[in-house]
Amino acid sequence: MKERPDLERWLPLPNAVRLGDPTALPAGFRAGGVSAGSKPSGALDLGVIHCTEPAMTSAARFTPSATAAAPVVITRDRCDTSRLRAVLVNSGNANASTGKMGFEEAARMQGAGSILLGIPIEHLGLCSTGKIGEPLDGRVFVQTLPRLGDDLSSDATTFNQAICTTDLFLKRAAVDLELAGGTVRITAQAKGAGMIHPGFATMLAFVQTDAELSASRCGKLLDNALADTFNRVSVDGQLSTNDTVVLQASGASGVAPADDAEDKLVQAALDHVMLDLALQLIADGEGATRLAKVRVKGGDPLGHAADKVADHIATSPLVQTALLGADPNWGRIIQAAGHALAGRGPVDFDVSFGGVQVCRANQATRYDRDAANAAAAEQLVEIEVSFLGDGEATRYFCDLTVDYVKFNSEYTT
């Protein structure tokens, strides 16, 4: 696996936050990962994240796909998502579009996992990732559970490895946050490299903290963070059948936010961790070589129009291939923006690359071509688009490469 890319320019640290060790779980958590032999390579394919504190709280959010996978449906509809003590994850097989058998095999794994961990079945969530439409043999994983139980520790590394499929590096993040009552830790792990688009980016993500939080607060924190992180990234514009994100709070630190100001600090710390993961996802987009951040200003104050424009730009194959070629091609951006607001009458757009304005009111300007080309050739490309109005929206995306096409023509998903 390759190393995590340098994304710090887009990840300023919030107040009272310092970077932590992403391998060291917060107090009250243990995790592990083993190989059940479902991958031809023998790579790790079964993992679990477990909160040992009975009074813990949690929140979970899932793909809105109309073809959601069996583990998503079971966790969403049958579990108490405010008390998910543990999540059992298999990789290599999505257990999606597998009919009644898929639900039976998922239920088999859930039942065996709850017995292993000694927790109620409704407190054990399930996640799967991998090929769609391939039958899952849950017995292979159930037989491996005792070894998984022996592997559990406060180190998240093997769990992180076990959830990966086509990932080229481990996606993980951690921060420590100083509150009046003491220090709380937030750690997170994710997987994902393709089929990534808002709502929420194709991925599994798991976030842990030892802060004391109510279940309702967990839900609000997670929703707020999702809105500005995983729901703002795209690799290929494709929504997955298996997207799941889980936030667990053990409360083991004994530290709770003391007031609204500290609530905001916790939110900022969580936002930072989840944006870090989201950016790592697109940095590992299948074949990706360059990332872009598009900031759109204009339209209605609520940002609906700006959102549409940003979304169309981030998912435009023409824009993504221009990004690959380090081409400050404002014409493709204008085309995508105009498509987003089709039927609304004439709209004048301004476009800049890295602060170099290349287009004003849909027409070329006189600009420093060397500076614009240099801005478009950076590893982290910044694009600004503006039109009349006060709305704002941001999207992060990657280039579209020959390797992406080659990989997805050769690998069954």
Image (cartoon, rainbow, N blue to C red):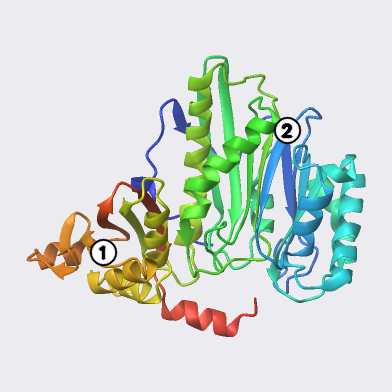
Q: Are marks 2 and 1 in contact (CB under 8 Å)?
A: no
Of badges 2 and 1, nearer the viewer stands: 1
Image quadrant holding the C terminus, namely: bottom right
Question: What secondary structure is marked by label 2?
Answer: strand
Q: Residue at coordinates 76% horizontally, 51% vertically from top-left?
A: 76
Image quadrant holding the N terminus, namely: bottom right
Residue that mark 2 sits on? 57
Would residue 173 be seen by someone viewing this image from the given angle? no
Could you tell whether 404 is left or right of 351 in the image? Answer: right
Q: Residue furthest left?
A: 366
- Mark 2 crowd level (few <14, some 14–19, many ≥20, 10 Å Cα): many
Question: What secondary structure is marked by label 1?
Answer: loop
Q: Position of residue 161 (x, y in %)?
A: 65, 56
Name the residue nearer the viewer: 7 or 388.
388
Q: Quadrant of residue 243?
A: bottom right
- Mark 1 crowd level (few <14, some 14–19, many ≥20, 10 Å Cα): some
Q: Position of residue 381 (x, y in %)?
A: 30, 59
Could you tell whether 113 is left or right of 408 in the image? Answer: right
| Mark 2 / mark 1, whichever is N-terminal | 2
Name the residue nearer the viewer: 137 or 199.
199
Instruction: Count all numbered tags in the image, as a single digit.
Output: 2
Compared with 266, 273 (above or below) is below
Residue that mark 1 sits on? 347
CA–CA distance in space, label 2 to label 1:
48 Å
- Amino acid carrying label 1: it is Val
